[in-house]
Amino acid sequence: MNKSSILMVDDEAEIIKLMSLYLKNEGYRLLQASNGLEALDILQAQQVDLIVLDLMMPKMDGLEACMKIRETNHIPIIMLSAKSQDIDKISGLSVGADDYVTKPFNPLELVARIKSQLRRVNRFGAAPANANEIQIDNVVVNIASHTVTVDQREVKLTPREFALLRLLAVNRGVVPSMDRIYEEVWNEPFMESKNSVMVHIRKLREKIETNPREPRIIKTVWGIGYKIETF
């Protein structure tokens, strides 16, 4: 049986009741909270492996709760919301969410996304709780604030570019494959999407490398994928 603990944070009791059936059927341990404040209390007291966090809640909404969690914790977070506009998704991902699911949703899809995020952690490992900043030569990646500086000058990355850099930075020395990079950053099956990864790597190099034509930070491992060396 799967012993991972899933924290469902939603003020709609019916959603928690519905998901409890699916999650318990998969062997997960379910924890419940109706707002962000309750979620923070549970995180302090119990082991949690993944959070499904509703966006609109009383007392403390999902965005604020996500930012608070990201100050000290890098547990996978899936944002759940009835808001489906791109700007809402970008807001959720920008404050630290790993995935975004819109309501109404298929419970089986949410379970699949939960499994995907837990596989990512099991495969690559989670960042330590105090690893808010990762320094790679002259580049500093701040996981909590979603900011990147090069030679102490902040550079602007898109949410997807940041997610890509974060994945490589957290797993320095490891070579994530092209399909794994796509599945973790785009949160969907690979389906021969090498060009999308290559284009974003190129744009990322243009922003953080001193000489993008001869990259020092993001190395290509031919036939496999990309990696960041340990400096």
Image (cartoon, rainbow, N blue to C red):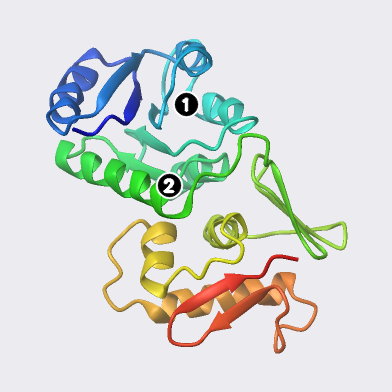
Element at label 2: helix
Name the residue beneath numbered marker 1.
62
Report the residue at 18% width, 17% height from top. 17
Q: Residues within 10 Å of mark 2 (few under 14, many from 20)?
A: some
Query: Quarter holding the N terminus?
Result: top left
Name the residue carrying label 2: 121
Vertical comparison of 145 with 136: above or below? above
Residue situated furthest front in the rendering: 1
Tag 1: amino acid: Gly
The amino acid beneath tag 2 is Val
Residue at 36% from the left image edge and 46% from the top image edge: 117
The front one of 7 and 84 is 7
* SS class, disc 1: helix
Q: Is residue 140 left or right of residue 118?
A: right
**Quarter of the view holding residue 171:** bottom right
Q: Earlier in the sequence, mark 2 or mark 1?
A: 1
